[in-house]
Structures are given as C-alpha cells and as structure tokens.
Image (cartoon, rainbow, N blue to C red):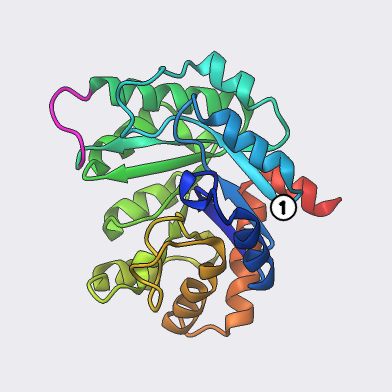
Amino acid sequence: MIDSHCHIDFDDFSEDRAAVLERMHAAGVKHAICISVNLADFPRVLALARSRPNLWATAGVHPDYQDVEEPTPEGLCRLASDPKVIAIGETGLDYFRLKGDLSWQRERFRNHIRAAKQVGLPLVIHTRAASADTLGIMREEGASSCGGVMHCFTEDWETASAALDMGFYISFSGIVTFKSAESLREVARKLPLDRILIETDAPYLAPVPHRGKRNEPAMLAATANFLAELLSIKREAFIELTTANCYCLFNRLQKSYEH
C-alpha cells in the first residue's frame, strides 16, 4: 500500500511521529507522500521526506491558505528540483471554506499547473464546491499534459469522468467508508480500476472503524479493505493494483522503486 496523501509533518504528530511511522510499516504501507500546504512549512515537509527512504514530499500552497506567500511557477520549479519532491500541490479551488473574491485562488491554481507542466511532475488537486471552475482551469491550462490526482475525492461522477478524460487519477480517503457517502461509493463502482488511488489525508478523516480518531498512515488498511469489498476484489489484488497505480502516476517514486 501507498498512502498517496498525508500530513504527518503536522504538529498533531510531534509527540509520537516515530511510533506512527513504525505502525505504518507494520500495517504494510510501503510509502507515504507528505503534502505541502504552504511555502513557510515546505522545509519541514522536505526534511521529513529526507529523513526516511519511503517518505516523499510535494511542493505547493493549499487553496485555503489566503494570507501567505504566493507561489510563482519559477519558485515552485526550484522547490521541485529536489529529487524527494514528486508532485506539485496541494493546489486547486475551495469555494466551501472561503467566500468573496477568490480570483487569487484561481490564479494560484494556474501557477501550480504551469509549474507542473514545466518540471514534468503530476499535480495534487483539491476541489471543494468548485468543480466547474476547477475543471475549466485544468482544461484552459492544459493540465492533461502533466496529469495528476484528484485527492480526497468527494464530487460527482461527471466531475470524475471529466478528470479521467484529462488523464487524472481519483483518490479515496476514509470518507468513502462513512455511512453518508453512498453517492461517493457509486462513483467508486464506476471507476476504471487502473485510475484508483487511496490515501489517509492524515491527521484528518479517519476511516470506519477509527472515525473520530486522529488518522495516520496505518489506518489506510481500513480504507483499502473497504474498497476491495465494495468493488468485489480480493484485498491483496486491490492493494497491488492501487500500489501499481501510484508508481505509474508518480514517476520519481517509480524510479526509486525500480532501483
């Protein structure tokens, strides 16, 4: 298994991070991708990724972070020059948490796509209550040329289908295990198996039966087990499949795996 999206650099893990990583290994999670959410914290994310051969980083600024240093395509490309950085993001649009003039959010998203295309790395995209604009900008900026993943997917089939058409993967978090998420499970049932990724988004969104607890990479197993049963696939086959998908998307991770 590969946790394709987590935030184990956060202070939530400051007291027991070593134990969290031990549990991750024991649960069969081979790699974890530690996601950047702003430029100020990027050095912390990168330091964590460098500390272990199976931890990786991304470079980007989350759309919910408003009053922070704005990333430029050139700046993101510089950060991505480190071989431990395997994607650009987390980026995208979020009209749920923030209101008003969000033109800055859209321009930030465009800058991430431009950087990803320049360095040849995939995008990690966050979209919430903004699917039409997210897809529109992806098309306008030619995001299909670099590809990426729609992380912690919670949108409808039409959004998933449009992302698939642009060569993107769809990643499921613990939300797919929640009782209220039947519409999301319907999306999962329709997806081609070679486009599915899994993630924790730790410390958030712990899957059933851990819901309400601090999430961590070891809990990825619960989401994998749930989806395997939902899709009528043997657990081992589903894990092998989603792991292969992750290696296929993240080319720097693939090169590490091959060597």
Q: Residue furthest left?
A: 100
Residue 191 placed where, x, y %? 42, 66
Q: Quadrant of residue 137?
A: top left
Residue 191 in magenta?
no
For the N terminus, the quadrant is: bottom right
Would you say residue 176 is visible in this rendering?
yes
Range covered by the magenta-colored residues: 97-102
Image quadrant in which you'd find residue 221: bottom right
Camera-side residue: 199 or 131? Answer: 199
Find disc 1 in the rendering and name its residue: 54
Q: Does residue 131 sit above or below 54 in this rendering?
A: above
Which residue shows up at 48% across the image and 85% down it?
Answer: 232
Q: Is residue 87 visible?
A: no
Q: Magenta stretch: residue 100 in it?
A: yes
Residues 144 and 96: in front is 96
Q: Residue at x 49, y 24 (%)?
A: 40
Q: Is residue 118 left or right of residue 209?
A: right
In front here: 54 or 118? 54
Q: Main secondary structure of the magenta part?
A: loop
- Whether residue 7 sits left or right of residue 103 in the image: it is right
Q: Nearer the viewer, residue 196 or 218?
A: 218
In the image, residue 114 sits, relative to residue 51, either above or below, namely: above
Amino acid carrying label 1: it is Asn
Circle 1: element type: loop
Q: Position of residue 134 (x, y in %)?
A: 31, 37
Q: Identify which residue is drawn at 21% across, 40% down.
A: 97
Identified at 49% across, 30% down, the residue is 60
47 versus 175 height, above or below: above
